[in-house]
Amino acid sequence: MKRIFAAVLALCLCAAGAAMAQESEDGWAAGDTVVFGSYEQDNVLTNGKEPLEWIVLKTEGDRAMLITRYLIDARAYHKAFVKMTWSECTLRTWLNTAFYDAAFNDTEKQGIVTKELENWKDVNTQDTVSLLDNDEAKTLFENHADRMTVPTAYAIAQGAWQSQKYGPGNAQWWLRSHSWEEKHRGA
């Protein structure tokens, strides 16, 4: 079963559930929208990739944690439907290789920081592109409505699941920590 993901960008820049990005000359603040990298979004493959829009989730010094404004692709968490950790899932591998190479040019990659992520019930990982974990999703967004986003035409064509429960067009996205893990951790 495919589900959509929102990649978080780390720029000191780009994409990690905790990756961070260098500030622009004007500085960035939480809630700002920035353009960085490109990826297919309109599902018209003949016109090339479209610029990626990111929302600044937080800043720390000269770095900012970013998340894609739209859900940009639909991918399974892992190639097989089995209990799987973030450190070993195929989605993590794809994000840090194929997606990373497709979305960012060599100049953009120079601004991307590899971030050590603490993964609950899993080994820590070194990622340039990642997903948020459950705690980050809860603390970086004020409420459930703020976590809502819509998939791109390309993501829909790839099988992004859209929820009618939360309004037309809204889609669910992967976290690197599964909610079933969070429910059973006793916190």
Image: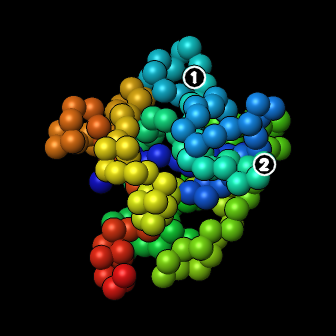
Query: Circle 1 sits in a helix, a strand or a loop, which is it?
Result: strand
Distance in Å between CA atoms under marks 2 and 1 = 26 Å
In the rendered image, residue 147, in percent from the top left (x then y), is placed at 38, 46
Identified at 64% across, 36% down, the residue is 103
Residue at the image position 68 percent from the left and 38 percent from the top: 28
Residue type (three-letter) at the residue carrying disc 1:
Glu
Residue receiving disc 2 = 62
Left or right: residue 96 compared with residue 91: right
Q: What element carries label 2?
A: loop
The residue lying furthest to the left in this view is: 165
Which residue is found at the position 63% from the left and 40% from the top?
Answer: 29
Mark identifier at residue 50:
1
- Kind of residue indicated by mark 2: Asp
Quarter of the picture containing the C terminus is bottom left
* Camera-nearest residue between 88 and 178: 178
- Position of residue 101 relative to residue 94, above or below, is above
* Front-lying residue, 62 or 101: 62
Residue 45, image x and y in percent? 51, 20
State the image quarter where residue 80 is shown. bottom left
- Examine the rendered structure and indicate whether residue 72 appears above or below residue 135: above
Q: Give the quadrant of the N terminus.
A: bottom left
Label 1 crowd bin: few (<14), some (14–19), many (20+), radius 10 Å:
some
Q: Is residue 176 visible?
A: no
- Of residues 65 and 139, which is closer to you in this image? 139
174 shown above or below 29: below
Quadrant for residue 161, please give it.
Answer: top left
